[in-house]
Amino acid sequence: MSKQSIYGMTYEQLTDWLVDHGQQKFRVRQVWDWLYKKRVTSFADMRNIGKNLIALLDEHFVLHTLEEEIKQESKDGTIKFLFKLSDGNLIETVLMRFNYGLSVCVTTQVGCNIGCSFCASGLLRKSRDLTGGEIVEQIMNVQAHLDSKGKGERVSHIVVMGIGEPFDNYNNLMDFLHVVNDKEGLSIGARHITVSTSGIVPKIKEFADTGLQINLAISLHAPNNDLRTQVMKINRAYPIEKLMDSVDYYLERMNRRITFEYIMLRGVNDGQEQARELARLLHDKRHLAYVNLIPYNSVDESGYKRSESADIQAFYETLKGKGIPCGVRWENGADIDAACGQLRSKQIKKQTAS
């Protein structure tokens, strides 16, 4: 019998499972306290739940399916982890330090099928989705690293922006979000969690229908269909008109701000014409929109280059002048394979070469 990660079970799911296996409901609170507050590394360390329940959990679940392969630490405090899954696949997770807290960027898939032409994550196509437990374990492993330092630090923010398209792994994503947000568990506030999508229109609407106060970010990267299709294949399935329709639906249902991510590619999407076009596209949404201008982390295979600083500044000033809220997100970990998926891609190439 194949065991599953216990971290993939939401509070409600684990409650139902325990009751179905003859346990009393109150036991789930005890188990979750050991998992997420005391953060034990073995079921045997759960000292107040009884030997029979420990044996039952050990029979059906595992605590650890991720193994740390590589850990890169940047001068700015960013740490990039390369984890090996139980099937040998590799994923990346990143810890970033900000003045507002410690944020972890998690991966949701092994590889990615979206095929954005500028992205290191898309160099290797998706081989499978991560389970909810494997996504939660990324947070637990990073928190274990922090615990080992003895400084009392905790993960306070999460961004679902790592390898893969989160909305292409929707059910496991939702289980993950419920686990990390649950007040009985890690209790990371919904407004401290951001999910980024390349624009899967039906899932944006479905996400809006959940009513979760989790932040939504959309990878836009171009203000018109021709240019967006050039850099993001997904635009063929969900062109800007359909994407903006789903954005309107989200804003109407949630009345919450959406962040539009815009990677600055030299000579491709960083001109004044594109800035003005982007301002027109978002003009009627400007009170609930924020544009995050992102200097590009170069990937050798893509051929794209980072926009000049002067062009980024000019683009920013044009948007601001048109009343569009925006900012420039300078990257973390520039000295440690900063691009998402870059460390994983390099490691896989080394393994293939050897």
Image: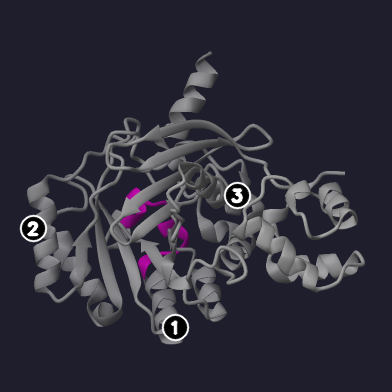
Q: Name the secondary structure under disc 2.
A: helix
Q: Which residue is mark 3?
A: 137
Query: Which residue type does callout 1 highlight?
Result: Met
Residue that mark 2 sits on = 314
- Depth check: 66 or 186 in front? 186
Count of labels shown? 3
- Quarter of the image for residue 291 reads bottom left
Q: Quadrant of the N terminus?
A: top right
Proximity of marks 3 and 1: CB atoms separated by less than 8 Å: no
Label 2 and label 3: CA atoms lie apart by 41 Å
Q: Which residues are magenta?
A: 228-240
Residue 326 picture location, percent across and down: 21, 67
Task: Estimate the spatial distance between the alpha carbons at disc 3 and disc 1, rounded to whole Å.
Answer: 29 Å
SS assignment at label 1: helix
Tell me the kind of residue under disc 2: Ala
The spot of residue 98 in percent (x, y) is: 30, 55
Rate crowding at label 2 as few (under 14), some (14 to 19) or many (20 or more) other CA atoms within 10 Å: some
